[in-house]
């Protein structure tokens, strides 16, 4: 019975593979955006706002692909694939996830970075003047980052260091 229950963890491998495939799709899309930026620059040469918007969009897409790669590796090497202590030490630190809490903390930190870049992309692509409600997203980002920082402090006080 225990063997059957432990074998169920391989279902998580489907999530890991799915996240990896989604990351590949996003990397493809990011490269396509960069190629469009190069073609706009080569064709017109004076459409700086369009080129900046495409490059920022590509960076935004690449960052989200990185989030998915981190998620895929963390699930695979944290919860599905059992490694010896020596093999585990050879993994980069970001791939050594030991708990769901640590995985959530890492992902929220990366998502905060993604949201900052996404906001900067939106501001760079905005053709009209920005209104006061544009501040909702950066305020939300600051609140999420503050909550993440408070959670880190609380976990350190309990003796569970966050990487």
Image (spheres, rainbow, N blue to C red):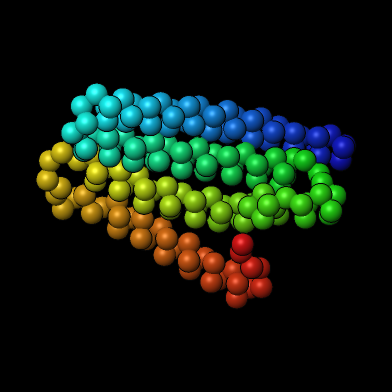
Taking 70 as reference, is 139 left or right?
Answer: left
Depicted 108 relative to depicted 69: above or below: below
Q: Could you say where residue 85 lies in the image, as x and y percent from the top left?
A: 84, 54
Identified at 58% across, 28% down, the residue is: 21
Q: Could you say where residue 22 lies in the image, as x and y percent from the top left?
A: 53, 30
Q: Is residue 25 visible?
A: yes
Q: Could you say where residue 16 lies in the image, as x and y percent from the top left?
A: 64, 35
Taking 55 as reference, is 82 left or right?
Answer: right
Identified at 65% across, 42% down, the residue is: 73
Taking 22 as reference, is 130 left or right?
Answer: left
Q: Is residue 22 visible?
A: no
Quarter where residue 101 is shown? bottom right
Q: Could you say where residue 40 lies in the image, as x and y percent from the top left?
A: 27, 27
Identify which residue, 40 or 22, lies in the foreground: 40
View extreme (left): residue: 129
Quarter where residue 128 is shown? top left
Depicted 22 relative to depicted 96: above or below: above
Identified at 61% across, 62% down, the residue is: 163
Identify which residue, 109 or 10, lies in the foreground: 109
Count numbered badges in the picture.
0
Identify which residue, 152 or 33, lies in the foreground: 33
């Amino acid at each position: 019975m225990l063997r059957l229950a432990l074998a169920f963890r391989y279902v998580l491998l489907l999530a890991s593979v799915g996240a990896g495939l989604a990351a590949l799709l996003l990397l493809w899309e990011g490269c396509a955006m960069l190629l469009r930026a190069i073609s706009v620059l080569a064709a017109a040469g004076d459409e700086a706002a369009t080129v900046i918007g495409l490059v920022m969009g590509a960076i935004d897409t690449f960052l989200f692909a990185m989030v998915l790669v981190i998620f895929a590796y963390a699930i695979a090497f944290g919860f599905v694939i059992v490694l010896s202590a020596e093999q585990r030490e050879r993994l980069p630190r970001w791939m050594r996830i030991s708990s769901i809490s640590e995985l959530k903390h890492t992902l929220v930190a990366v998502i905060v970075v993604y949201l900052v870049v996404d906001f900067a992309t939106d501001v760079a692509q905005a053709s009209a003047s920005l209104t006061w409600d544009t501040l909702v997203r950066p305020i939300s980002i600051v609140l999420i980052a503050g909550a993440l920082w408070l959670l880190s402090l609380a976990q350190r006080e309990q003796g569970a260091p966050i990487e």
